[in-house]
Image (cartoon, rainbow, N blue to C red):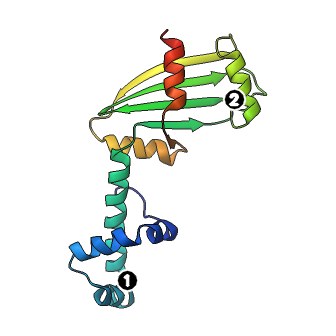
Amino acid sequence: MKYIRLTKEQLEELHPEFITFLATQSIDKKEWDELKKNKPEIAEQEIDVFSDMIWDKAISNINYIDHFSKNYIFLFKCVENIVYSYVINSNVENVDFLTSEGIHWLSDNIFSDDIEIKRGKKDISDDRNGALFTIIKQGGIISKGDLFIKLDHLLNQ
């Protein structure tokens, strides 16, 4: 597997797509039921292939990923095979970016000496989707890029 198996809940949400996938493999409902009962390892392989296909399609459409932790915010913009990033770090011990108070504090102090902002750029042409999936596995959340765009605008005025 390239990614991770979809959860039972995710598979249930994607039931129509999974049926279509099985049909492309020439597997009908009767055969699928037999596979699950008599050859569960093959049924699991089919689920794994389907999971990878779904993840690949979803990751291919990602443009932005945000990752928040107590003292850091990582903002990523994915353009073809390049990831641009901003890393925001608070030097103040009691600030927590996981709270609304921490985000409010950040907006009031964005240009103070208590905040460090670093820019980055990385070529991910070797394995774009794998690189983005790693960020997601580490806690990244797919976003619309609002924070990245606002910060980029503030820093490049």
Residue labelled with disc 2:
103
Residue 1 shows in this picture: no
Residue 133 shows in this picture: yes
Position of 85 compared to 113: left or right? Answer: left
Q: Amino acid at mark 2?
A: Ile
Name the secondary structure under disc 1. Answer: helix
Residue labelled with disc 1:
40
Name the secondary structure under disc 2. Answer: helix
Location of residue 40 in the rendering, given as x and y in whole percent from the top left corner: 37, 83
Along the line of sight, the residue nearer the viewer: 29 or 84: 29
Q: Residue at x 62, y 29 (%)?
A: 72
Compared to 50, does 37 lie above or below? below
Position of 79 compared to 11: left or right? Answer: left
Q: Residue at x 44, y 64 (%)?
A: 6
Q: Residues within 10 Å of mark 2 (few under 14, many from 20)?
A: some
Q: Amino acid at mark 1?
A: Pro
Position of 108 compared to 155: left or right? Answer: right
Location of residue 105 in the rendering, given as x and y in whole percent from the top left corner: 74, 23
